[in-house]
Image (tube, rainbow, N blue to C red):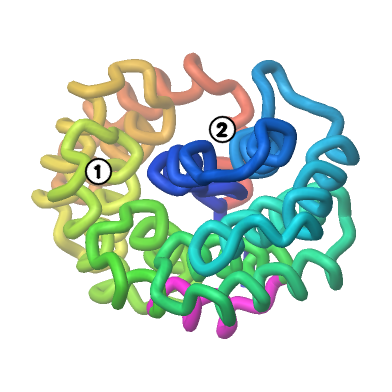
Amino acid sequence: MNTPALWLTVFLPLMAVRALAASAVSGEIAALAMLCTEGEPKSTVPAKIESACTSAIDAKAYEARQLAQLHLGRANVYDFMGEKSKALADYDMAIEIAPDVADIYFNRGVYFASQSDFDAALKDYDAALSLDPDLVPALYNRARIRTARGAFPEAIADYSHAIERQPAEPGLRMERGLLYIREGDYQRALEDEDEALRLAPKLALAHLYRGAALGRLGNSDAAVEETTIAISLDPALAKQIKTN
């Protein structure tokens, strides 16, 4: 099974960052905690963030959800640095400390998916969504795994829920439209691709999928036109079309 695209590699809630900043700790430790959970503009050397996280954790100035967010921040930077075992240990620790925080399960799910452990990823996305049913990144990532496994109705349900929460996100419509094509519901597919292109007229894949829906509805001329537009926007699609 192909690895599904991942929505995010880091998903830190701003409320947690503000809570860390507001804690009654020294300015130096608070600054380290902020760096750990928020980073710096235009990227920061990962080792510097890891050091900040470790120093803030070792200071023992935080507990409960705040401490969990520090472990989550360090887990994400370890993952980025390729320190996979250390990353997993911190994700696990964050969940042990704060088992009721959806974002932590989501991040660990992304980690598992990046390791091609899709069963574990699904369990974490399920856990995240049980805590926060409207967490769109988890809905999207779960839909991608379900799609790769052929669970199209379940994936469509995830996309539909995500669209309810973020109706202006064209990629959600585009992906659901493709699933409607696979389910043989070409009219709904066309409606989704039309909406995706209304939101993002230069979305190459949406033109391609729209062409596929039109072709299956019997409008071959329009299908060819849409495919031509798709290739003009993304020439790499030409090779993909030939191999399918």
Magenta region: which residues?
116-126
**Quarter containing the N terminus:** bottom right
Q: Is residue 100 above or below residue 11?
A: below
How busy is the neighbourhood of tag 1: few (under 14 within 10 Å), some, or many (20 plus)? many
Residue 117 highlighted magenta (yes or no) = yes
Q: Is residue 221 visible?
A: no
Q: Where residue 134 appears, x then y in whole percent? A: 24, 59
For mark 2, what is the residue?
Answer: 237
Residue mark closest to the camera, 2 vs 1: 1
**Would you say the magenta stretch is mainly helix, strand or loop?**
helix
Tell me the amino acid under the disc marked 1.
Answer: Arg
Q: Where residue 16 appears, x then y in whole percent? A: 46, 48
Q: Residue 29's quadrant in the figure?
A: top right
The residue under the point 39% across, 29% down is 227
Element at label 2: helix
Instruction: Please tell me which residue lies in front, 30 or 208.
Output: 30
For mark 1, what is the residue?
Answer: 173
> Of callouts 2 and 1, which one flags the residue occurring earlier in the amino acid sequence?
1
Element at label 1: helix
Instruction: Please tell me which residue lies in front, 118 or 208.
Output: 118
Question: What is the distance, in whole Å, between disc 2 and disc 1 at their CAs?
Answer: 19 Å
